[in-house]
Amino acid sequence: LLSAMPDAQVYPNSITCSAAISACAAEGQWQLALDLLNHMPGARIHPDEITYSAAIGACKKGDQWKLALKLFSSMPGAKVDPSTITYNAAPARRDALCNSCPKQDIL
């Protein structure tokens, strides 16, 4: 759908990319969500905090907690300030994100 937009003289922006990434998250397609995020700069579209939140959410849904944390920590380098939405999307703890990870006792 995003690739067909220019044919209709409608061009993707951060809003349409965020919506596409959110759709990927809803379908459990975290790899595609990250691919879309990674291709945005090449299309001269600057990801914003909503885009990152959507991608982090896609990683969470796919139990990719390490990738979610990596995305969150990469935001300042991309000149994107985390918002309340992003903080809510980011995992506070490993077990809050990874349902399939073994639990470890803390002494």
Image (cartoon, rainbow, N blue to C red):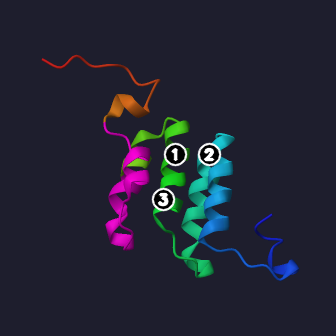
Examine the rendered structure and indicate whether residue 101 appears above or below residue 48.
above
User: What separation in Å lies between label 3 and label 1 (alpha carbons)?
Assistant: 8 Å
> With 50 as the anchor, is 94 left or right in this view?
left
The residue type indicated by label 3 comes to Tyr
Quadrant housing residue 104: top left
Which portion, as a residue range, is magenta?
A: 70-92
- Whole-percent x, y for residue 9 in the image: 83, 83
Q: Amino acid at mark 1?
A: Gly
The residue wearing badge 2 is 25
Identified at 37% across, 40% down, the residue is 91
Residue at screen point 49% across, 40% down: 60
- The 10 Å Cα crowd at callout 3, few under 14, some 14 to 19, many 20 or more, is many
Instruction: Confirm or deny contact between disc 1 and disc 2 (CB under 8 A).
Output: yes
Residue ranking furthest to the left? 107
Query: Between disc 3 and disc 1, whose residue precedes?
Result: 3
Q: Which residue is mark 3?
A: 52
Q: Is residue 91 magenta?
A: yes
Mark closer to the chain start, 3 or 2 = 2
